[in-house]
Amino acid sequence: MEQLIKVEFPNLWLLLPELAVLLTGFTLFTLDLLYRRLNHTLAISVSIIGYLIAFLLLLLNWNAKGETFYGLYHRDNFSNLLQAFMLLLTLLLLGFTRAYYEHRKSLYGEFYYILNFALVGSMFLVSSYNLVVLYVTLEAVSISFYILTALLRSDFNAKEGAFKYLMLGGLSIALASYGAGFMYLYSGSLDLRYILTHIGENQYFLVLGLVLFLVGFAIKIGAVPFHFWLPDAYQGAPTPITAYMASVGKLAFFAPVVRLMPYVQEHFAYAWITTVGLISAITMLYGNLTALVQKDVKRLLAYSSIAHSGYIMAGIAVAEVIGLKAVIYFLLAYALMGFGSFMVLALMERVSGWENRLEQFSGLRFSVPWLAFSFMVLLLALLGIPPTVGFVGKALVFMALSFEGLWWLALVMVVATGISTGYYLRITALMFMKEDNRSFNPSTSASERLLMVLITLGVVLLGATPIILWKFVSLSAENLFAR
Amino acid sequence: MEGFPFISVSMVLPIVGSVLLLFLKEELAKWVASATSGAVFALSLFSLLFFDFSEAQKVQFEERYSLISELNLSLHLGFDGLSYVMYILTTLVSLSAILWSTRDHQISHRLKEYYAWFLLTETFLIGVFASLDLMVFYVFYELTLVPMFFVIGIWGYKLRMYSAYKFFIYIFVSSLFLLLGIVSLASVHYKQFGKFSFNYFDLLKNGYSLEFEVFMFLLFLIAFAVKTPIVPFHTWLPDAHGEAPTAGSVVLAAILLKMGTYALLRFNIGLFPEASVFLMPLMVLWGIFTIVFASWFTISQSNIKRFVAYSSVSHMGFVVAGMFLLNAEGLRASITEMFAHGLTSSALFMMAGFIYNRLHSFNMQALRGSIKFMPVFAVLVAITGFSSMGLPGGSSFWGKFLTIVGAREYTLLLSFLVVVGAFFSAVYVLYLLKTLYLDTKEESRLIHFIDIRGFKLLALLLMVFPMFLVGFLPFLFFVFYDPYIQNLLNYLISKVGG
């Protein structure tokens, strides 16, 4: 140790959004402790107000860049963008959860603060380069997700999903921390940027550490062959939580990998392209092929989520600015589409006897036209039909791949997307082309309908005017690359 | 009126119409749709007054709205002679198809949706022909799939869902290759000029090695060969056209196939001149192969809609062969044939749909001699048939004749091959006409048939009358695209050097 770190008061200004969210969490926790029966309207109001305040603070901090707590925390445009999306998605989620849990008779006070801890963890996870912070927040997010998954009264599937998630999630965190240990052993630093820019001879420990670290994250994002927990957890979890894991969870777990992209080019360019590209190819093929044979729509969308991880990883394989832009755009796009599509299922589950089976969707257009139309738009967006965000994302990934000359991966992606046509279209066709006399109507409130329409409109309009998202995406990618 | 945004107005009008009719009563849907597409057609005719024919190689009615300036992605719309012809064909056929639907028995339920999808198709099709930005072109190209998917799947005949899937999957998967090609061109532009661009005129400046150019040519070709279609990529077409409702088949055959040929001409030949010249013999022979084989397939059909559908494939063979002759006559033949086939195939599909309404069968055996007691209809079908066959004075005559002339500029053998193709394509039309007119059937059933009248007559006349124009006054059409062809040939010579 040549020099001691100069102790100064940390710049809390940068941390204000997280602090606001954390404060909301503690308030919710206290409320739950104080009241024997928590008033859920109060809890939701507190959450919404807290997150809105956090969002406003985030907007105040919008162009703030910098580090605090001696480099443990790093705020830049990238983290701002992702955090804004996370807050918005959480706000959207709160519009749906109460009726869902009431219907399943599982309305617990714990839900609000555990959701809050997941959010705090995610917000930190997207804004750090430090191995310890990454480890701790990864734990925070994961444990919250295990609990949220299991939080459904007398539902065997939820327990099974949560348990599988817990086992493999624990493994992933063990691997990531083991890898982090090796990297520290090699470089004597916990800062990923330092580790990857100061590479000497004899890189075995570094490579070993990096691989283990990345495998840990690969489990979390559901990359094949580390995906086995994902379909069960997604299917078993309460559907709004599935939507949350597929959106905010994806954003959070992908972010540290995305942050690595500017640093791997110098030393690992070839290895990075081959390994990430290969895993991406396997993931998208496996995800889509397996989704094709699913009879349960929730599970099908879970496999489609795996496939989308594959598309995103195809962008990650291109460690260039254009690849980074594609990845960030696609991540945000998928967060929106995945959230919306799972939320459609959450609404449909109000119908008694609804099990998300494929054939139950036939003739949905006649019973619930607005929801069927929303679901159609979301499915076509997942497929990548213009002018939706899904299309823009896919086009950008193609652009990144052609820029790098990764033709084989591009062709695999073409094939994988072609396979996915089968199942997205099947649901669409069932909803619109089969005439069914059953009539059922999930009792949805006006606010839920409004939110659903907003999500659908967002998917279309953000895709039709790509400049809105692109401005932010482009800026944050360039900032990341400027190091 | 000089700066009037003809294109965006004619794209926005159908959207407005389709939104409007969703809020109106079910019975009013057809009238709103007819009025809207009629207005767009009138607008397209009116725009003729402002089109400068002497400068038809230049882009006119240009409009540009930036989408992502960093990527040079913009909604860049404009017509030159080639796309202008296609635009007029689109508005004409859309109007005719919607008029036909108003009296079609197949279209008896979910009317609002039906007409809304049709109007949206019209918007997207105009977008396809007008866009000068490749990404925007792709967006519209893909978007046309969605309404047609629903039109086939909801209002089609027995195998409608299967056909709708097949249609969507074939075209969607093949067009992903196109997407890959388009973004690759933008990447190449970045590497050569330091900025991304999807604009057609920017991408024209790209330089490629021959291998890369051929690779790109093939990526584009996969998409357009399926769309056009060229044998052996045609297998989606008989199903989609055979099972779609009449108006759906009309739009599919008359315009959606033209998207493929139009794009082949504009993008494959325009952007990859060296690869085009390199692959020219292959493409011409492939086109002739398509003519001959599709003609044989046609004759063997027992379902009249599939019969007409296969005949479309054979016509597309002429378009492709003519186009890749890469001389003035061939290109002229190709573009004239695109327009002419739009008319004749529409009319033939209307014929099939009309007879189905009377006989409830598409079987060639069942409809022998069925046309006898409907004189007006019989005359119109005869005109269509002979036009399609390429009888002098018929609309397809110029397409076939000029292809033969163009082929003669290379070798006698090649033009002989085209003649063989033309022969087979005449055979199936004669076979069709013989079945409809000359074969006998007990006449007691036929005598009650009511002749074509009203809106259906109007729709059919809208197709038949322009056939005369193309057949007898072809120069009216040549003025649209002759400057374009001249310009293209000069460009090819400057690129390839003779």
Image (cartoon, rainbow, N blue to C red):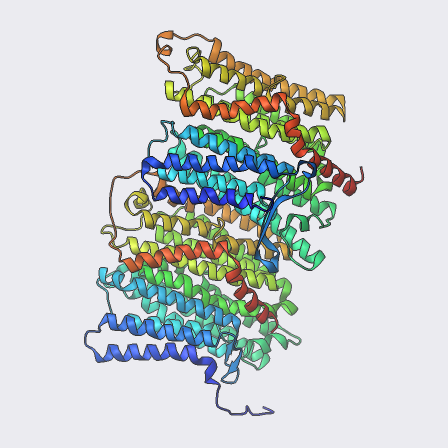
Image position of A394 with respect to B323: above or below: below
Q: Is residue A24 left or right of residue B17?
A: left
Left or right: A243 with respect to B309?
Answer: left
> In the rendered image, which quarter contains the C terminus of chain A?
bottom right
Residue at the (49%, 55%) spot, across then down: A463
Image position, residue B25 (x, y; %): 31, 39
* Residue in the picture at 24% in, 44% down: A439
For the view shown, which residue lies furthest in the left direction? A36
Of the pair B405 and A125, the residue shown nearer to us: B405
Task: Give residue A430's position: percent from left, percent from top.
Answer: 35, 42
Q: Is residue A390 visible?
A: yes
Choose between B264 and A169: the one closer to the eye: B264
Q: Looking at the image, which is closer to me, A211 or B267? A: B267
Q: Say which residue appears at 58% left-offset and 53% top-offset.
A: B74
**Position of A190 relative to B227 (above/below):** below
Can you tell which quarter of the image residue A306 is in? Answer: bottom left
Residue A167 is situated, as x and y percent measured from the top left of the image, at: 38, 66
Q: Position of residue A432 (x, y in %)?
A: 36, 41
